[in-house]
Image (spheres, helix red, strand yellow):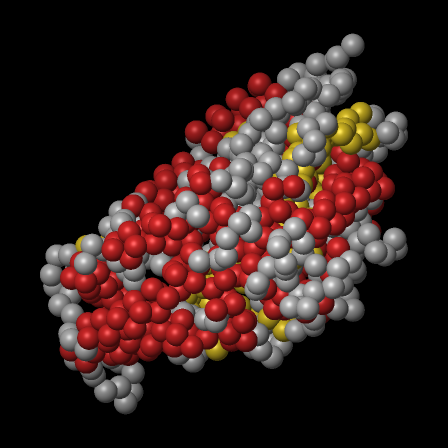
Amino acid sequence: MFNKRNLPIVLMVLGCGIFVAFRSFGYKGDPPTKYEKILRDVGVMLEDVHYSPKSIDDKFSKEVFNKYLSEVDNEKDILLKTDIDALKKYETKIDDEILGKTTIQFEPAVVAILKQRISETESIYKDILSHPFDFSKDETVSEDYSKMDFPKNDAERKESWRKRLKYLALERYADLLDQEHSSIATAGHVPKSNGDLEKEAREKVMKIMDRFYERIKYRFSDDERFNEFVETVVESMDPHTAYFPPVEKRYFDEQMSGHFFGIGATLKEEDGNIKIGELLTGMPAWKSGQINSGDIIMKVGQGNQEPVDLTGFETEDAIKLIRGEKGTEVRLTIKKADGTVKVVSLIRDEIVQDETFARSVIINGEKGKIGYIFLPEFYADFENPKAHRCSIDVAKEILKLKEEKVDGIVIDLRYNGGGSLYDVVQMVGLFIDQGPVVQVRDRDGKPHVYTDQDKNLLYDGPLAVMVNEYSASASEIFAAAIQDYKRGVIIGSTSTYGKGTVQRNIELDKSLGFSNDNGDLGTIKLTLQKFYRINGGSTQLRGVSSDVVLPDALEYAKVREKDNPDALPWDEIQKANYTTWKYAYDLNPIIKASEQRLKNDSAFTIINRDASWLNAQNDKSHSLNIDKYREEQKKWKLAVKQIESLSKLPNELKVETLPQDAGKFDNDKDKAERYARWMKGLQRDIWLDEAVKVVDDMVSSKSLVYNK
């Protein structure tokens, strides 16, 4: 997001960085180890550069203490309560380590205990899995580890292991029973007894655990443990401040610039799981409509082959399994935020990004011709002035829609995670005469107002902006500006994501111009600014509330910024000087009309009910009784199936390609097929259907309010 206006910020960062370097040299001699050098420089960056740093004191030390122990043993089945008590002597000393007042002691002490306990628990799981499980007993197990404490003794820890291993085996046993039932009529099938299937289920779990322990014993190095500790420290400031160790940063850069065949999703390791990070628009994972950021990848299968369980796998290993030859099938078994599990079949494709650009179509509504603009991200290439920019591309789409004399426009920012601040300002300017768009405040507290200074107006008709829980950052700035100017109506989930902060990457050594005998120290992604609406309120934490609220499957899932306890707080500053849209709509009758439609629409009612029910199941214990487990799974699958079915319109929307885009993909069969699938998705989209109806109401509305 670099532009000339950001130059003072860049200079400030560099200035603070140099100050960091000199402060680091304030030791009586250089720090004795590379680890202490990294931790000290990170600490100074947090103190001197972070937008709103917490005091690095005993309180912060306790927070890091508890967080790190939960990170290294998040299921609380390796360490004992006595271990935690023994480590308490470091509880208020971590701040001294970060500030360079003492050598690093806490993290090595944790690792030493972990190694001992890992050896013990390896014997525990091997012993438990060597004996049959009785799935007829009425037992339960909980996966809500946040409400658990570390086991008091060996017996309590072993019982915890027994129940969790039994649940893992039960999942696989139920699958094997289903497979056995479906294979009975298959020629040449050799029947298996329930006992054989139970043993096979335990053997599968044994393989998973062996692989996991092989990793943590032999492949999880001291460097990785330390990097995890530093990451815990920086994330304790806020969720978007992060530490990238050298290897991970280089790997990330390689992936960003490489060409390969895959599903078009970044992966991340979190809480011992491989999770979906970001989806590349237009690629297989995104096009499936069944995968979201934060989904856990449980298994990866190559076509019809038996899938590989990813428990204990590293991210790089998972990526190798997911990548393959173009056109081949990969099957992902994923666990959603609501706890449901599903298998998604994807066909590998070349990972390209040209489908991330803005595009538009015409939707024939009941009362008018509605233009639809899809914008997956606020993209811009500041290194190449000839490259695509979202504000310029959106302007081109608006001109094409105006040529077709559309009566209204819908801009779809669902799942748009943000991007270029400069382009947000330019894009808002397409819909207003001129005026402030967003306020940005630095650490010094003085806000800077980013203003659209172009008096030219490209489009002045009815406007709607679609958002959801994953609309973040720049998307929220755009939606907030449109809402504050009363320029249009915001349609979607109760609120957007709530990310009102901006980060920049700062290398700990090379970017500061200092040599380092220990090699690259890594990069810190640091929160430097905060966004504010022109009405003075921050988009942080609260996001943007929709004018027209549409129930969706993610409403009750804890995926927003507000669900992270380390998120920076909401606040407000002085309102900017602006005048609302002179042709502003009275949205009250439009909102009421939508509410009435929703009350009469059983699809939205059931989606809301099922989404709420699915979320509630996350707080419940799981049965270890096969019959009750099957009944639970039956209810989950029914709820998920209902949501998937009701999310598709029974009567398709009338979606048309613009005449200017006709034949655009005649020379590219793959792109033509992807475009056709995208169009098909729009035709069946119940949320888009309601957005079109809202704009229809605006088109026919007599409720214009002229602001003199």
Q: Residue furthest front?
A: 28
Instruction: Name the residue furthest bottom.
Output: 188
Which of these two is toward me, 562 or 217? 217
Residue that appears at 70% across and 34% down: 442
Location of residue 384 in the rendering, given as x and y in whole percent from the top left corner: 85, 56
Can the viewer see residue 510?
A: yes
Q: x, y percentage for residue 359?
A: 73, 50
Residue 84 x/y as whole percent: 31, 53
Kindly identify the residue that appears in the image at 29 percent across and 83 percent down: 186
Residue 678 shown left or right of residue 406 in the figure: left
Quadrant of the image for the C terminus? top right
Q: Is the residue 698 above or below the residue 661 in the image?
A: above
* Residue at x-position 67% and y-position 48%: 23
Please indicate whether residue 487 sits to the left or right of residue 215 in the image. right
Q: Residue at x 49, y 40 (%)?
A: 57
Count of numbered circles in the view: 0
Residue 467 in sight here: no
Answer above or below: position of 328 versus 344: below
Q: Quadrant of residue 461?
A: top right
Q: In which quadrant of the rendered view does residue 468 lie?
A: top right
| Along the line of sight, the residue nearer the viewer: 346 or 256 | 256
Residue 378 position, x and y percent, is 72, 46
User: Left or right of 430: which side holds 28?
Assistant: left
Identity of the residue furthest to the top in this view: 708
